[in-house]
Amino acid sequence: MVERNVADAPSLTTDVGRNRKMTLIELIVFVVMISIGVTFSKCAYKVGGFWLAVPGFVLGCLLIPGSILGYERYRKWAYLGDKWMPPCSCGSEEYKPERQNDHFYTICRQCGAVYDKRKNQVFLVVDDQIKLYRTQVKHKGWV
Ligand SMILES: [Zn+2]
């Protein structure tokens, strides 16, 4: 009879901490949205009374999500999809972040290649040597 070891079972990891942080940011954005809406409606009220204050409030609230949406659309158009990482040399596009010596690297899940992403450039790390892998260029994507 074979005895199963409980420690061999795959451990479950949760993203609870990360989700809570996102919720806090969303809450702050929401509060800022409402305050911009109130400011807009106050200005509109001085100009055109109550019936201008209502659309002023809506416009003010939509200012932030509207500009975020517009910015994302612009980036998708300008960078051809705006992928945060180019595909790995092995063809995979799945990565995981890994911390080494107080620095975050991006590791390919399929072949284990180590990448270092710095803004619009991605470097390949091989035996403590780094070389430029891809650059994100407007209208061309990753080249
Ligand atoms: Zn790979």
Image (cartoon, grey):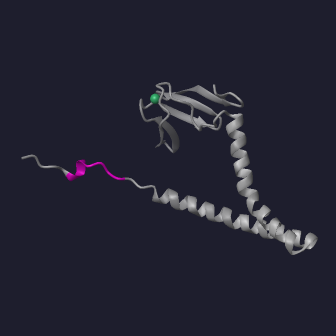
Is residue 128 placed above or below 22 in the rendered structure? above
Residue 113, image x, y percentages? 46, 30
Residue 87, image x, y percentages? 53, 30
Where on the picture, by quarter, is residue 123?
top right
Residue 78, image x, y percentages? 72, 35
Q: Residue at x 32, y 51 (%)?
A: 11
Q: Residue at x 74, y 59 (%)?
A: 62
Q: Residue at x 57, y 31 (%)?
A: 86
Tell me the magenta residue range.
6-12
**In the image, 2: left or right of 32?**
left
Q: Nearer the viewer, residue 70 or 7?
A: 70
Q: Quadrant of the C terminus?
A: top right
**In the image, 47: left or right of 55?**
right
Q: Residue at x 51, y 45 (%)?
A: 102
Q: Nearer the viewer, residue 110 or 73?
A: 73
**In the image, 42: left or right of 86?**
right
Q: Nearer the viewer, residue 53 or 22?
A: 53
Looking at the image, how many numbered discs can be counted on the residues?
0
